[in-house]
Image (cartoon, helix red, strand yellow):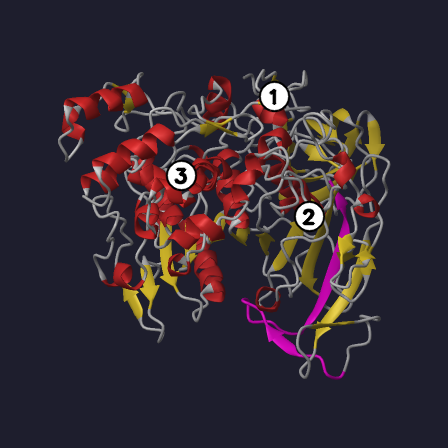
């Protein structure tokens, strides 16, 4: 399948294939030199241009002739450089592009080069499919309930003490672009507003960038709207500097961009009131630019990584056109922010060059398998005193550190697959109800991604409305299997649990029957990259996993998800040497060190031989000091490979790091599933007595057969519909790589 971006690293916004042509004028027998010209796009792929402009690069030998640019046959005026002899390079911001196809033609003497740019509105969409509707702008959000019972409007905090309270509600939620300035004081915490950047305050702090520049710590902060979201870009500012992509980068920018992602997971339908955070003092201090958008916060962006990828692509394109093309773009974010990075890098490689992930989840689809099965069918059964399960037994069925994780910490998180789980920002009157408001907003994450998963009618709910397909399935899953084989639950408990472990319907209402996932939804989840795999994009990017250990607190950010993610890389590539796991407690922070190490890693990759396969280059370029490790509470660093032993689900303590930070399992691992935990629907096999460390009586075997009449999960085989991820898919309007389900 053709790719929007190549995997080679260049100083462009994304590693692009050459978009233009090099044409040379014909030479006669007496001539010794000819004109030549090449043109390529730097700010985006040529078929994914947005906002009516594009940064292009001309490489030409003029032989005394000045380059001439025409856009759609109209002359484009630009400050052409002097007509020096020899090979010349110039960057030009082409503006005034129309929506749709635009022809850019460059002429140097008798030589010509041309390319076609396909432009989309700055309000989107480009590849994410039809805009989600309804979509609430700032002024349309339900008010926030204050502690005193009053209602307060939801606002976007700019970061200088001021707020955005409204945005245009004519379908695009636009806000005027504004630029503000802040500074770091030597005496005060945080950033202070700066009204006049030409007048440097006497108490301004000084910072030193990674390139050794000593500068006053003044920040330029841009706020605007792209793709119906509010974005922000923060950079160090020097008085008199030109913000331009066609001029040399200012001393205060180290030519690196950090793109931040926020956490959570909600159904979307609203603009949002925060970004992943751009006023990051320690990052800005070193000269990095920082960018983010409200749709890159998973709790606001619909838990829709395609929409997040599209938004990051557009914001990064804007940055490249107006600030300069970053040498590297480094993703940063935890929890839902980590989830987005892994999904974007896997399905849309090139947007992010390196990933800094924390409190990692591999993806939303497989995470909610664990969450919903714990809090849905299992928790009510386990907590029913009539079933006679003590707390230890309830816990061991999931291999958790304690019952609190399932019973309390997960809370209502499984409701993310429920249509009733609407964010507080959406007025109650708009919410879906099967009888009272059947046409209301359905707030499951799959309904929020209906462009991807498609829709169908379900007879199990009292509405004729089509709703999004769901990939979830638990047919054939033997819950507690490994606990049974370890002697931690009895045969009777095992049979009772599985006999009563039902499922849920499309409205996430519990049913006595197991759930049958939609076959198309399952296949789509794999093909489109909604379930991360170790192939595709994740084999093309270095990853540092900053694992804050919370298992002992019964926190749902369990450390097993770091191992799950890496297991997928190991399975698909034979190793996971591009993935480093660093474990620690809350008293240790590795954020600044990890950023520095990632920057070094990416710079090393650039110096590797490009003829070598990219994954091999990534592995060879890893800084020698960057290894799996963990940190004791006193700061001692322990270097040893991070291991998850699937044979020790209930006491995974081999090695010093696992003694300090023992990883725990989950329902599907205790049911015999693989560490990769990415089988949505298992292939079935007949019940085999050799799978059990106990001996069933004839009556017990008959009961087991009645519980699983079609067979049980064969975890040794790939899941039903499990296939490789396709990259750079479009769900519309772009026709390039348009997904055909």
Name the main secondary structure of what is drawn in magenta.
strand
Quadrant, the C terminus: top right
Q: Is residue 151 above or below residue 59?
A: below
Task: Check disc 2 and report the residue beneath it.
Answer: 294
Q: Are marks 2 and 3 in contact (CB under 8 Å)?
A: no
Residue drawn where x is 66% and y is 24% of the image:
734
Q: Nearer the viewer, residue 572 or 588?
A: 588
Residue 102 higher or lower than 200, as above or below:
above
Q: Quadrant of residue 185?
A: bottom right
Give the secondary structure at mark 1.
loop
The residue pinned by badge 1 equals 461
User: Does the magenta run of residues contain 212?
Assistant: yes
Residue 539 numbered mark, or none: 3
The answer to whether one can see residue 34 in this image is no
Q: Residues within 10 Å of mark 2 (few under 14, many from 20)?
A: many
| Front one among 4 and 133 | 133
Q: Which residues are magenta?
A: 202-226
Between marks 1 and 3 in the image, the one whose residue lies nearer the viewer: 1
Q: Which mark is residue 167?
A: none
User: Which one is in front in this view, the residue at disc 2 or the one at disc 3?
Assistant: 2
Residue 210, image x and y in percent?
54, 67
Relative to 558, residue 195 above or below: below
**At x 60% / y 71%, what residue is drawn?**
213
């Amino acid at each position: 399948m053709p790719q929007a971006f190549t995997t080679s690293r260049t100083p462009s916004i994304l590693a692009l294939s050459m978009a233009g042509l090099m044409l040379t004028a014909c030479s006669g027998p007496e001539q010794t030199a000819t004109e030549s010209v090449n043109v390529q796009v730097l700010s985006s792929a040529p078929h994914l241009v947005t906002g009516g402009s594009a940064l292009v690069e001309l490489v030409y030998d003029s032989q005394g002739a000045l380059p001439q640019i025409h856009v759609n046959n109209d002359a484009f005026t630009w400050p052409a450089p002097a007509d020096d002899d020899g090979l010349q390079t110039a960057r030009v911001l082409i503006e005034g592009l129309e929506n749709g196809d635009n022809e850019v033609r460059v002429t140097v003497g008798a030589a010509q080069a041309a390319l076609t740019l396909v432009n989309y509105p700055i309000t989107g969409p480009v590849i994410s499919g039809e805009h989600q509707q309804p979509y609430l702008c700032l002024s349309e959000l339900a008010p926030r309930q204050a502690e005193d019972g009053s209602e307060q409007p939801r606002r976007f905090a700019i970061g200088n003490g001021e707020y955005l309270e409204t945005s245009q509600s004519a379908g695009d939620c636009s806000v005027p672009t504004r630029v503000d300035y802040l500074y770091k004081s030597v005496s005060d915490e945080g950033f202070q507003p700066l009204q006049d950047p030409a007048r440097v305050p006497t108490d301004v702090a000084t910072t030193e960038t990674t390139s050794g520049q000593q500068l006053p710590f003044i920040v330029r902060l841009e706020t605007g709207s792209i793709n119906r979201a509010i974005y922000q870009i923060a950079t160090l500012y020097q008085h008199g500097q030109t913000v331009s992509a066609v001029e040399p980068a200012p001393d205060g920018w180290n030519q690196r961009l950090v793109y931040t992602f926020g956490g959570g997971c909600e159904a979307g339908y609203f603009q949002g009131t925060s970004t992943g955070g751009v006023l990051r003092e320690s990052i800005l201090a070193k000269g990095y630019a920082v960018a983010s958008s409200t749709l890159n916060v998973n709790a606001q962006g619909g838990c829709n990584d395609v929409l997040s990828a599209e938004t990051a692509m557009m914001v990064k394109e804007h940055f490249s056109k107006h600030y300069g093309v970053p040498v590297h773009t480094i993703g940063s974010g935890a929890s839902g922010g980590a989830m987005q990075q892994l999904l974007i890098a896997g399905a849309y490689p090139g947007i992010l060059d390196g990933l800094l992930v924390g409190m990692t989840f591999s993806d939303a689809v497989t995470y909610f398998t664990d969450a919903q099965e714990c809090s849905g069918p299992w928790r009510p059964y386990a907590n029913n005193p009539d079933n006679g399960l003590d707390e230890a037994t309830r816990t061991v069925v999931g291999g958790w550190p304690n019952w609190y994780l399932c019973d309390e910490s997960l809370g209502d998180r499984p409701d993310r697959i429920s249509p009733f789980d609407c964010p507080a920002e959406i007025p109650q009157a708009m919410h879906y109800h099967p009888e009272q408001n059947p046409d209301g907003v359905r707030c499951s994450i799959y309904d929020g991604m209906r462009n991807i998963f498609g829709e169908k009618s379900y007879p199990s709910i009292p509405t004729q409305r089509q709703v999004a397909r769901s990939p979830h399935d638990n047919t054939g899953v033997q819950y507690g299997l490994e606990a049974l084989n370890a002697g931690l639950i009895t045969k009777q408990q095992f049979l009772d649990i599985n006999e009563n472990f039902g499922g849920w319907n499309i409205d996430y209402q519990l049913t006595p029957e197991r759930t049958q996932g939609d076959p198309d939804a399952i296949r789509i989840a794999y093909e489109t990259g909604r379930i991360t795999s170790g192939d595709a994009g994740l084999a093309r990017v270095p990853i540092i996993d900053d694992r804050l250990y919370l298992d002992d607190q019964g926190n749902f950010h369990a450390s097993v998800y770091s191992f799950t993610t890496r297991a997928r890389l190991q399975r698909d590539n034979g190793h996971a040497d591009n993935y480093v796991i660093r474990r620690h407690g809350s008293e240790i922070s590795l954020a600044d060190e990890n950023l520095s190490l990632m920057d070094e890693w990416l710079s090393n990759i650039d110096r590797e031989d490009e003829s070598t396969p990219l994954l091999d280059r990534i592995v060879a370029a890893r800084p020698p000091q960057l290894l799996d490790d963990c940190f004791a509470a006193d700061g001692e660093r322990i270097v040893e490979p991070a291991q998850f032993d699937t044979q020790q689900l209930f006491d995974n303590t081999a090695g010093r790091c696992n003694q300090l930070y023992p990883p725990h399992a989950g329902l599907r691992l205790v049911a015999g599933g693989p560490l990769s935990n990415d089988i949505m629907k298992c292939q079935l096999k007949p019940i085999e007595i050799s799978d059990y460390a106990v001996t069933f009586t004839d009556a017990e075997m008959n009961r087991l057969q009645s519980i699983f009449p079609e067979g049980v999960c064969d975890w040794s085989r790939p899941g039903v519909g499990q296939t490789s991820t396709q990259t750079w898919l479009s769900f519309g309007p772009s026709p390039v790589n348009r997904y055909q389900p």
